[in-house]
Image (cartoon, rainbow, N blue to C red):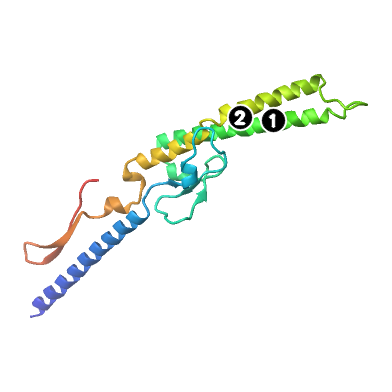
Amino acid sequence: MHTISWLAAARWQLRGAASMALVFSLVASARAQQAPATIRLHPEDAERGLNGPQHNFEFLPPGVGGEAYQSAGFFGQKLRPYLAGNAEALASLDQYRRQKTIFLVDRVVAVGSFGLWGQQILIGDERQYFNNTQKVALGVFATSILATLFINRNTNTYMKRAVQAYNDAPPAHGSLWPRLRPSGVGLGAAPTGQPLLALRWAVR
């Protein structure tokens, strides 16, 4: 009698465990559908094209939904931890950082050359607007402004390529649960007749 009661209790415990595993699997799947394990750019940033705006990108990290966008940083440095392990995505992000660095140097040259031109105005007894030094300064300034067009042409494209490379990669970069989640849950019986919880995994 005691053995029968114990087996009945064991069956109910196994059924409860199987039900919990099934419910957890369904909840995890629902959450994954609501917040995909992908990086999503802000809609306005996703629309940037060649020579588009150069302000910082905003993105939703993997598994985050809603409107909780965060800045990727001037060089995209806040996005880098999410791309770890994805060589293609990191290579594109490195190109983005290189272009932003060149852009920053170009801005310093432009401001410096314009400042030199202004400093030369009051250098003599009379105001100077086009002496030899100012001619050079204006030439450097004009060259810097023109160079900006070429520097910024593909900058946004590199960031979008980095995000796309991450999203196109196999799901190994996502949550650990999709890889560990059993593909089937049920009840089985041991050769002795004792009930067992049966879990089945598919290779992912």
Q: In which quarter of the image is residue 28?
A: bottom left
Viewed as shown, does residue 69 lie left or right of 28? right
* Residue found 87% across the figure and 30% down from its top: 122
The residue labelled by disc 1 is 110
Residue 198 appears in the picture as rendered: no
* Residue found 57% across the figure and 35% down from its top: 100
Q: Is 191 or 79 nearer to us in this picture?
A: 79
* Residue found 77% across the figure and 32% down from its top: 115
Question: How many residues crowd around disc 1 within 10 Å: few (fewer than 14), some, or many (20 or more)?
Answer: many
Q: What residue type is labelled 1?
A: Ala
Measured as percent of width and height from the top left, residue 172 is found at: 33, 45
What label does residue 148 carry, if any? 2
Residue 38 appears in the picture as rendered: yes
Viewed as shown, does residue 93 lie left or right of 1? right
* Residue found 88% across the figure and 27% down from its top: 127
- Look at the numbered discs 1 and 2 and tell me whether their residues touch, using CB distance below 8 Å: yes
Viewed as shown, does residue 171 lie left or right of 122? left
